[in-house]
Amino acid sequence: MNLSPVPGLDDQLPVDPLAERSPEAIRLALSAFDASLNSIISMTAIRDADGKVVDFLMRSANPAVEESLSMTPDKIIGTRLLDTFPGNIESGLFDLYVSVINTGQPEKTTQYYNDVHGLEAWFAVSAVRQGNDTVVVTFMNVTDSKQAERLVKKQAELFQTVLDNAQAAISLHAAIRNTTNQIVDFRTVMANRQSKAMWEEFAEPIMTKTFFEVSTPVQQEEDFPKYVRVVETGEPDFAEFSIGDQWWLRITAKSGDGVVISNMNITENRSYRQQLEATNMELKRSNESLQSFAYIASHDLQEPLRKIQAFGDLLKEQYAPVLDTDGCHMIDRMQSAAERMSALIRDLLDYSRIAAQRDMFHPFSLSKLLDDILEDLWHPIQQTKARIDFGKDDDQPLPELVGDRFQLRQLFQNLLSNALKFYRTGADGLPIPPIINVCASEVRGADLPVEVRQNLSVNRSYWAICVADNGIGFDQKHADLVFQIFQRLHGRQQFEGTGIGLAVVKKVVELHDGAIQAQSEAGKGAVFTVYLPM
């Protein structure tokens, strides 16, 4: 260690304090000096003619200064403090050293330092006077820890800003335990601005006192056990409560050895929910009234139609000799119109009765359902000599479905009836026997066709049930039109019907959270694909 003075300054320097010690004491002191993890510099005051301290001569520096200052001891020893480290003036450290020399009182500080030489850091500094004009400075470069501290503080401020700008009132409460580790109380640790606004005049007591010191007996009886249960089980608690005319949703979750409570104002949502519930009740009553009206109206409308048909039959039976050919033709047309009207009323009644009753959803076999439908369609199947196949070439069985069996029976019966009805005829004018295939496959939501994907969930899987025929088909541009009520692509003279069958199909599919797609080409048959959730 170099303890030699700067040339020309010998007359200003005091005697080295180590010079009066024994050789062994000096050796031990120097060993401790060199081995210290802290940076140590000893400096002697330099005074002007008036005795005022104007600078310091750095007389010794241990090896640790290199890590703190990025400068070796030999570059420091023998130089003036303000020449080598001019930033001591602006940082206030120079004044601190002067104060130590003048008063003899040690000083400690943590100070930011930078200078023209590029040294920039935070230092934890301790200064103590030795003798009359020597100050020993022990310091550490704490830039990393200071930056970490500032980062933590910044993150805490950011976190508090986020909390204060959140819509929910959020507060953190630590558990207070007794000597047997039992939770006996809670203390508020943190609360955002919304919490304090919600607490109003109770904000300060809640922040400074324990739960039992500020809560009501009702809160102590109802809320305290909830908080304890959340801490001990880790299961969150949900509750709704009111303050005046405001409604809140409280979510209590475990956080360390305590709870974090989030209170969200749901007054508007609750009001909307109540309005929605009232609207749903009114809609339910309206639907029930409408269904009742439809049933009564259809019954009352069918009665005069039956009379028209009955009197028409009497006219033809009893007065046929009196009526000429035109008269009989008009009666036939009247009877045909009455029959179409009767069928239309029946179909409208069936359409109005379709409702979303989830409690009626049950699993059932599609194969068994189709067998039942074929029994009902036995006559048109025999008339057209139709062939109906279930499954693909690999004989994959049809699946089990979950839904309203009655509604889905209507759906598939209407699709099969259409396939039987709209058959092609050959060049000789004779019917070409319908060939109908019903098959099913599993489709993931992400693999659904673009046309139906927007109406279904991509996170579910679906049964794609295809009903394909070799009938007359239709132009693909009419694919959406065929599902509209009363829409017909062919005249009544060609094909019977009311134009409601496919509208019923679409309504049933939608009530089962599914979709339907129609693909066809005129003269080349049609494929109806029903997508139902698995």
Image (tube, helix red, strand yellow):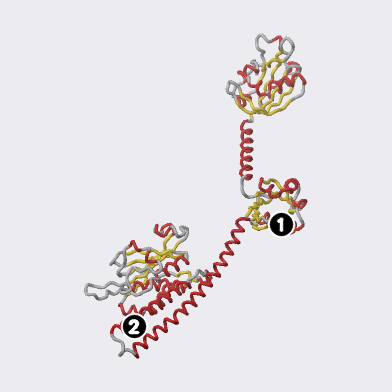
For label 1, the residue is: 223
Task: Give the SS element for disc 1.
Answer: helix
Task: Give the SS element for disc 2.
Answer: helix
Q: Nearer the viewer, residue 308 or 218?
A: 308
For label 2, the residue is: 331
Does 342 sit left or right of 422 as displayed?
A: right
Q: Nearer the viewer, residue 387 or 306?
A: 306
Q: Residue furthest left?
A: 428
Name the disc covering residue 513, or none.
none
Does 497 sit left or right of 115 as displayed?
A: left
Spot occupied by residue 502 in the image (x, y as percentages of width and height) = 39, 69
Residue 378's place in the image compared with 125, above or below, is below
Spot occupied by residue 6 in the image (x, y as percentages of width and height) = 65, 12
Callout 1–callout 2 Cβ contact below 8 Å: no
Residue 447's place in the image compared with 422, above or below, is above
**Residue 317 appears in which quarter of the rendering?**
bottom left
- The nearer-to-camera label among 1 and 2 is 2
Spot occupied by residue 463 in the image (x, y as percentages of width and height) = 43, 65
The answer to whether residue 393 is seen in the rendering is: no
Q: Residues within 10 Å of mark 2 (few under 14, many from 20)?
A: some
- Point 44% across, 63% down: residue: 462
- Mark 1 or mark 2: whose residue is earlier in sequence: 1
Does 291 sit left or right of 204 as displayed?
A: left
Amino acid type at image mark 1: Asp
